[in-house]
């Protein structure tokens, strides 16, 4: 026991010293330059940052307690809750980074102590710098990207989550006129218990799921059938047809959508013009709630089918011919061959893409916003029209109505759904994989 | 009997093709036709105008901010393509060729973030940019695009890097090559398709995207093409439709040609992440 303890002497002591005071363990390990550098940097950082951090954290907790007010006809600026929240968030990130540095310092001291325990010689400053450069090369490569992801993607996400637990909304809680407070789960509670909110949420969510499902299935089937028709052995000019049908994919989507918005316009759109000239009554393409939904699915079909067609053409060429020949020998009909051979094989090959398409369609903001703008109006809904999907509802609540807390609450629910869905998808793909995929 | 049926099928397919061809071509010819119509309203415009003129194109360039929007978009697109490609390549290289602590978690995070559209946190981005004084600047928009393309592109490029046999680099290392040499001499030339895909994708995004510019860029002289064209259609008077049509043609034509030319790369790249399933 005694021997064992003795053998761990250096590493334990070095780790404890480092834990007490950053850099001390390194000094103990006789890595003087490194130890001093650790110490100076840590102390400088700690003492300059301490007051800022204190203010940041209190701001995050209280969200400000001095409201703006008017004194002697002049506006006296109070606390701006949202800026306090962001500052607090940045402070937390920096504190976490500092904690990471602290732990690294302990681990480093312990490692070098270990080398000494085993009777080795610790590296000098220059040598350890070189070693660090070699060992940490992948982290160095990842550093810029992680900074980007942290500040552009993860931080907004966390901020978004936090907002859902505040009362940041028009008209009563908009800084810098008034303060924002933490209110816990009240927004979620309202969303599910207040009749107007609930019916809006449920109505939009149902249409959103229907839309994503129908659009994915319809595009899948039309792409498959089109590819099968183009690949039909007796069809001539295959290359011409393929090029012609891929065109809508190549045209920028937002332009196609805007063009359809004009084409389908009820009062002066050329399509209705044509229909009236042919002697029929005009179709309310975008102004009738049900018809508008159908129009959205049709327009989506127009520009999404080509990509699936191109994809399916590739898949169809890999179909095993002998299966079809065997089926023909057994006297299978055309329909049997399609439902028993083609469909299952194609589904197997394209399942990951279908899932991606579903996720994409679920949040296809551009199509809804540019084609119908969520209209026609739905008076029973809170801040939404009858073709709005969840994401466009969030957009409207944020940019037009300043219902920030409700917008975040809805987006959190969406995030949980999407994250669960993609993790499930990832696990499924991974279990299909034999080789070292990740 | 069977011969007749088969003939009928072929005729049927050709008929479907012709109908599809018309629906495919009609919106496109309509836009081109409208843009060439000398008149100002949609009602009098014909698909094939009697005396086509470039009047609307002149009007578009002289009287609207179209050229400004185009310049803005081009600037954002080039910066985005450049930055995104470098960052994505670096990240994908690290994930593909090195084994380090936190690798699995890092990849998992990227996957979840990829499924999570960046603009779901619209409000957060808006307030954060406001706080950092980057609202209504092109830099702010570029930074958000680059951040988004990292999670999008890394998986695609990593998938491609993974298919390059490691023995190639090992041979080079024996000959004394550094990591840098291995990357630039071996990996880079062999993964041109996926690099083209990422670069092209991030170049095109600013031309196609609407929602992020709409959040970040507020003043008319900072707008991108998508925003500008939308603003022409959004106000429900039909007088600007003809000018819009001219703008739509000018934007769509080069992008369509680009897409048709790079068709193979793009369709392959879009499925590369999923191919492995």
Image (cartoon, coloured by chain):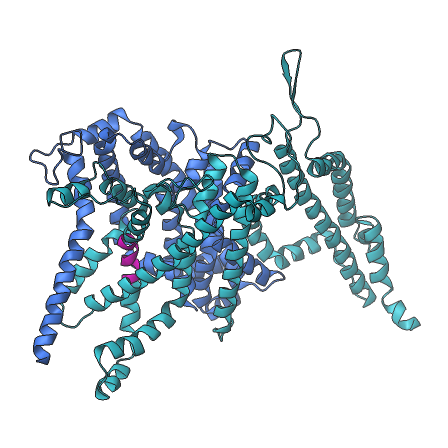
Chain colours: A cyan, B blue
Residue B177: in sight, yes or no? no
Nearer the observer, B58 or A182: A182
For residue A177, side relative to residue B39 (left or right): right
Residue that protrudes farthest toward the right in the picture:
A2
Residue at 48% over, 69% down? A429
> Which image quarter is the N terminus of chain A in?
bottom right
Residue A33: image x %, image y %? 77, 48
Residue that protrudes farthest toward the bottom in the picture:
A330
Residue A43: image x %, image y %? 78, 41
Residue A308 is a magenta residue: yes
For residue A422, side relative to residue A374 (left or right): right
Query: Vertically, is A296 above or below A340?
Result: above
Number of labels in the image equals 0
Residue A339 is a magenta residue: no
Residue at 30% over, 78% down? A341
Residue extent of the magenta highlight: A301-310
Nearer the observer, B123 or B81: B123
Residue at 44% over, 54% down? A206
Residue B1: image x %, image y %? 8, 80
Using the rendered view, name the quadrant where residue A308 is placed. Answer: bottom left
Residue A329: image x %, image y %? 22, 88
For residue B196, side relative to residue A54 (left or right): left
| Secondary structure mostly seen in the magenta stretch | helix
Residue B11: in sight, yes or no? yes
Query: Vertically, is A74 above or below B238?
Result: above
Nearer the observer, A137 or B241: B241
Nearer the observer, A324 or A291: A291
């Amino acid at each position: 026991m005694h021997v064992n303890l003795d053998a761990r002497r250096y590493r334990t002591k070095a780790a404890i010293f480092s834990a007490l005071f950053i850099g001390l363990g390194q000094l103990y390990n006789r890595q003087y330059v490194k130890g001093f550098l650790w110490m100076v940097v840590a102390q400088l950082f700690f003492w300059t940052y301490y007051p800022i951090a204190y203010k940041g954290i209190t701001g995050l907790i209280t969200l400000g307690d001095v409201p703006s007010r008017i004194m002697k006809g002049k506006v006296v600026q109070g606390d701006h809750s949202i800026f306090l929240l962001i500052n607090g968030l940045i402070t937390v990130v920096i504190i976490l980074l500092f904690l990471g540095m602290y732990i690294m310092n302990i681990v480093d001291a312990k490692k070098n102590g270990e080398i000494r325990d085993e009777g080795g010689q610790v590296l000098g400053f220059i040598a350890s710098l070189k070693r660090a450069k070699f060992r940490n090369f992948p982290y160095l490569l990842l550093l810029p990207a992680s900074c980007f992801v942290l500040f552009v993607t993860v931080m907004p996400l966390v901020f978004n989550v936090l907002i859902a637990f505040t009362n940041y909304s028009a008209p009563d809680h908009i800084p810098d006129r008034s303060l924002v407070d933490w209110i816990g789960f009240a927004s979620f509670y309202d969303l599910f218990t207040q009749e107007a909110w609930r019916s809006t949420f449920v109505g939009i969510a149902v249409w959103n799921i229907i839309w994503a499902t129908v659009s994915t299935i319809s595009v899948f089937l039309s792409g498959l059938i089109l590819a099968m028709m183009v690949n039909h052995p007796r069809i001539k000019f295959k290359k011409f047809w393929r090029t012609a049908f891929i065109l809508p994919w190549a045209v920028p989507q937002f332009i196609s959508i805007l063009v359809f918005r004009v084409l389908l316009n009820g009062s002066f759109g050329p399509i209705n013009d044509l229909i009236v000239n042919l002697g029929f009554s005009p179709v309310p393409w975008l102004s009738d709630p049900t018809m508008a939904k159908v129009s959205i699915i049709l327009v989506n079909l127009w520009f999404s089918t080509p990509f699936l067609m191109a994809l399916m053409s590739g898949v169809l060429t890999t179909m095993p011919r002998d299966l079809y020949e065997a089926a023909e020998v057994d006297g299978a009909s055309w329909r049997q061959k399609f439902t028993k051979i083609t469909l299952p094989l194609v589904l197997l090959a394209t399942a990951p893409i279908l899932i991606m398409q579903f996720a994409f369609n679920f949040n296809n903001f551009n199509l809804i916003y540019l084609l119908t703008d969520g209209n026609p109006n739905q008076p029973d809904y809170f801040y939404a029209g009858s073709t709005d999907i969840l994401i466009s509802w969030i957009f409207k609540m944020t940019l037009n109505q300043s219902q920030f807390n409700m917008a975040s609450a809805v987006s959190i629910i969406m995030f949980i759904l999407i994250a669960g869905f993609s993790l499930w998808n990832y696990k499924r793909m991974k279990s299909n994989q034999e080789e070292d995929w990740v | 009997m069977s011969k007749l049926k088969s003939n009928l099928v072929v005729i049927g397919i050709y008929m479907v093709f012709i109908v599809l061809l018309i629906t495919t071509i009609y919106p496109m010819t309509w836009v081109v036709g409208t843009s060439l119509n000398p008149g100002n309203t949609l009602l009098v415009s014909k698909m094939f105008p009697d005396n086509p003129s470039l009047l609307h194109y002149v009007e578009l360039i002289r009287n609207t901010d179209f050229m400004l929007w185009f310049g803005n978009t081009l600037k954002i697109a080039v910066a985005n393509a450049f930055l995104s490609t470098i960052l994505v390549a670096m990240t994908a290289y690290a994930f593909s060729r090195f084994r380090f602590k936190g690798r699995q978690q890092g990849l998992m995070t990227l996957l979840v973030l990829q499924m999570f559209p960046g603009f779901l946190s619209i409000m957060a981005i808006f307030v954060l940019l406001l706080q950092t004084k980057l609202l209504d600047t092109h830099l702010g928009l570029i930074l958000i695009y680059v951040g988004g393309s990292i999670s999008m592109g890394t998986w695609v490029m990593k998938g491609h890097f993974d298919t390059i046999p490691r023995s190639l680099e090992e041979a080079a290392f024996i000959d004394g090559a550094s990591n840098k040499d291995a990357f630039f001499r071996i990996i880079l030339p062999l993964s041109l398709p996926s690099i083209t895909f990422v670069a092209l994708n991030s170049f095109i995004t600013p031309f196609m995207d609407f929602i992020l510019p709409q959040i970040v860029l507020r003043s008319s002289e900072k707008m991108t093409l998508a925003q500008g064209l939308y603003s022409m259609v959004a106000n429900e008077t039909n007088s600007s439709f003809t000018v819009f049509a001219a703008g739509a043609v000018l934007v769509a034509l080069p992008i369509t040609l680009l897409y048709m030319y790079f068709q193979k790369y793009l369709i392959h790249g879009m499925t590369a992440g999923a191919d492995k399933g």
